[in-house]
Structure formats: C-alpha cells, structure tokens
Amino acid sequence: MNNPITGVHLIDENMHELINHGRPEFPVAFYGDGYKYLGSRSYYAHWHNEIEVTIAIKGDIAISCNDATILVREGDAIVINSNILHCILHDNYPKSIVQTIVFNPVIIYGYHTSDIERLYVLPIINSDRDYYYLKDTKKEGNWGKKCIDAFLNAIRFNISKKDGYELGIKIMLMDAWYILYRNVPKSNVVGNTFSAKVLLVKNAINYIHKNYMNAITLDDISRNSLLSKSELCKLFKKYVNQSPIQYLLRHRISNACYYLSYSDKPVTDIANKVGISDPNYFAISFKKIMKMSPTQYRRRIAAIADENKVEDFQDADIHPGSVPLF
C-alpha cells in the first residue's frame, strides 16, 4: 500500500514494493521531483517486477543497482531491469531533478506467450544485465538520445491527458523499447539473481521491517543477519547508502507518516507504534527527516488533500507527474 500524498514507501518482507504502478488496465506510472509539500524523498533500497526508467532532467544523480553504483549524468537515463535491487542516492545529489517511468512490460507485449514477449521482451528482462545506460550525446542519430526522447514524449503525453493520451504513451514506450532492443546486448542467461552480499542485506532489511516497532538495536540486526556489526554497516553503506540504524529510523518515520496521514491517533501513540518510546527523540528525528514537526506534517497533509495542488518545475519542461518513489 502506498500513500498517494505523502509518498510513504511501503515494502513487504522480501523488499518488494507494495505499490501499484498505474492501473491494472494501464500499468504505467510517472514519478518525479517537484512537489513543494514533500519534506523528504524516499531512500529505500527496493525491487519490483516492473521496468523502471529514470532520466536525469537537471544535474547528475547516482543510482545503486545490486552490486553497482551508476552515476547518471544530466540528460542521460538508466533503464533498470525487472526485479533488480535499486535505490536512488538522493543525499549525494540533493539538487538534482529526476523523472521516472515505471511500467509493466505487458504494455509492450500485450499478452503472455505472444511472439513479442518471447522474441523481444524476455531476451532483455531475463538477461543477466541489471540495467542499461542511455547516453544523450546531443548528436543526431544517436540511439541513446532517440530512446530518451521517446521516454520524454511518453511523459509529455501523460502531462497533456488529452483524448487518446494512453495510446500516445503506449506508442512512445514501444518506440523506446524497439530502439533499446536493437542496440543493447542480450543474453541467453535466463533470470537475473541477487548476489550473495545483496541477499545478506536483504535479510537484514527483512528483519528491520518485521521488528521496527520493537526496541531493536544494531546488535539485534547483526545477530539475526548472521553478520558482524562492522560487515553489516559496510554492506549497508554500499547498497543502501546509509547505516542500518539510519535505515531503521527512516523506516520508522516513513510508517509514522502513514499513521499521521490516515489516523487521528495522538503523536505520542504513533511514536510508540513505530518503535520510538521517547516522544522528544521522535519529534527531533521526524523534523530532521521531514523538515517539519509531526503536527505540522499532519496539518500540511490535510490541507493538501483538500487543495490537491502541485508545483510545476521552473527549470525544466517536464511536469512532476507524481510523488517520488525511489
């Protein structure tokens, strides 16, 4: 489940996103920066079955994909494959502006067992490639630029919401996929897999998700992950861009955002519910992450729900589209 206003990022015990990207009838969703009321972006390492395309609209952005960290330069894009553990490292590039499309590849191939799926989709999503980097060299005829332009046109169709915009989005995604298929290496390896180290991080995050409401410590996380504290911290820094305790705190605050948005529970009760018994520490931590107090957050969300207003970009010809999900 995802809070469409706050962008609370909920993940199940296997780090699989509990977010429906788009609608079952049209499984495409658009996300990006630009919401004036969001005090924080999401920082979660996660995976999902859909393909994710992130375009660096303004400034560079770093993205972790399984064992690699990729610097996506301004104007370039990255296509993250299905079921790949990934996270945008916002802390490293706080002023960057990104736009993202998340789509189920069924929109490309139409139905399972079709020739399009067998010949042109599975060779990419079942390959051993975690991601594909698209470079915009500004040169005429560059395939990376053509692919990025197709994705940007899909975003523009979504902005316009004119009659037939879904057809335009589908056509642009198919155009981009055709360009991608014709220009990237494909593999005979069936199924991408997490490395052993990624699985260790996954186990640690599973433990945090199941026990965040309790008074767990770094020792508890380490012991239940079968890792030393130093190795645990080292792996978290590499794959999640923060320490286990920082991740635990952000997960608690993320869930607190949900309860503040969807319940009338007192702030102290919510703090206890997410595993923070000291109300002062909760208030300080919440404000540090969300840039406002819990009470201010609750009021802001209530006002936004009534007004449902967003802020357009000033420096990019792209609309924010939706809340950040990374």
Image (cartoon, rainbow, N blue to C red):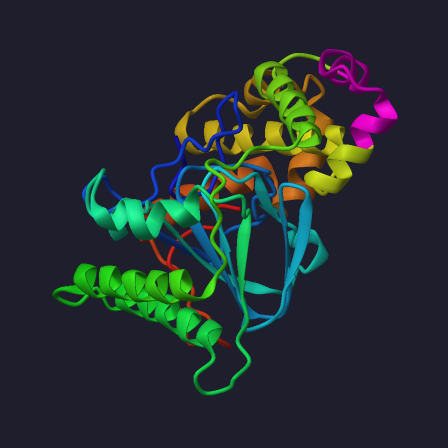
* Residue 320 in sight here: no
Q: Residue at x 55, y 21 (%)?
A: 270
Residue 266 percent location from the top left of the image:
52, 22
Quarter occupied by the N terminus? top left
Q: Left or right of 95: which side holds 190?
A: left
Comparing 232 with 303, the one in front is 232
| Residue farthest toward the front in the current orientation of the protein | 188
Q: Left or right of 114: which side holds 192?
A: right
Residue 283 lies, with reference to residue 324, above or below; the image says above
Comparing 230 with 97, the one in front is 230
Secondary structure mostly seen in magenta is helix
Residue 256 lies, with reference to residue 76, above or below; the image says above
Residue 143 percent location from the top left of the image:
45, 74
Comparing 231 with 12, the one in front is 231
| Residue farthest toward the right in the current orientation of the protein | 230
Residue 225 lies, with reference to residue 44, above or below; the image says above
Q: Left or right of 257: which side holds 179?
A: left
Residue 229 percent location from the top left of the image:
85, 22
Picture quadrant of residue 302: top left
Q: Residue at x 76, y 14 (%)?
A: 226
Numbered label tally: 0
Give the extent of the magenta segment.
217-233
| Residue farthest toward the bottom in the current orientation of the protein | 140
Residue 108 percent location from the top left of the image:
27, 52
Q: Residue at x 41, y 63 (%)?
A: 180
Picture quadrant of residue 183: bottom left
| Residue farthest toward the left in the current orientation of the protein | 163
Q: Please check the rendered image and state whether residue 178 is part of the magenta-colored stretch, yes or no.
A: no
* Residue 129 in sight here: yes
